[in-house]
Amino acid sequence: MKAAELRDMGGDELGIRERELADQLFRLRIQKSMGQLEAPNKIRTVRRDLARVKTVLRQKEAKRIG
């Protein structure tokens, strides 16, 4: 997911997306520890998407405050 797409989303949508990605990352890490992970690069992709969502949320918060 691109940052430009995330900036077009609302705060509530971003919060939901953040929770979904965090849950997905948790499940992927569990699969990795059990040796059942088929695509190891998926962890990196989800982690970076989560970071993008958090960054956009913080930018929106900073813009709202100041």
Image: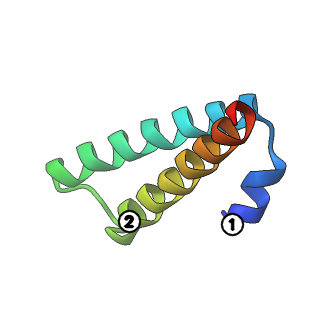
The one of 39 and 45 positioned closer to us in this rendering? 45
* Residue drawn at point x = 73 percent, y = 28 percent: 12
Q: Along the polypeptide, which appears first: circle 1 or circle 2?
A: 1
What crowding class fits label 2: few (fewer than 14 Cα within 10 Å), some (14-19), or many (20 or more)? few
The type of colouring in the image is rainbow
| Residue 56 drawn at (x, y percent) | 64, 50
Residue displayed at 29% across by 59% down:
37
Type of residue at label 1?
Lys
Q: Amino acid at mark 2?
A: Arg
Marks 1 and 2: which is nearer the front? Answer: 1
Q: Secondary structure at mark 1?
A: loop
Res 41 → quadrant: bottom left
- Tell me the quarter of the picture where residue 57 sits: top right
Residue denoted by label 2: 44
Name the residue nearer the viewer: 63 or 10.
63
Within 10 Å of the Cα at label 1, are there few (<14), some (14-19), or many (20+) other Cα atoms? few
Distance in Å between CA atoms under marks 1 and 2: 15 Å
Cβ atoms under marks 1 and 2 closer than 8 Å: no
Left-right relation of 18 to 3: left
For disc 1, the marked residue is 2
* Quarter containing the C terminus: top right
Which mark is drawn over residue 41? none
Instruction: Report the side of 3 relative to 33 (left or right).
Output: right
Q: Is 45 displayed left or right of 5 in the figure?
A: left
Q: Residue at x 48, y 54 (%)?
A: 51
Locate the N terminus by quadrant. Answer: bottom right
Quick one: which residue is furthest to the right in this view? 8
**Mark 2 element type:** helix
Q: Percent x, y for residue 42?
A: 42, 64
Say whether residue 66 is left or right of residue 18.
right
Q: Please name the residue shown 76% across and 64% down the image.
A: 4
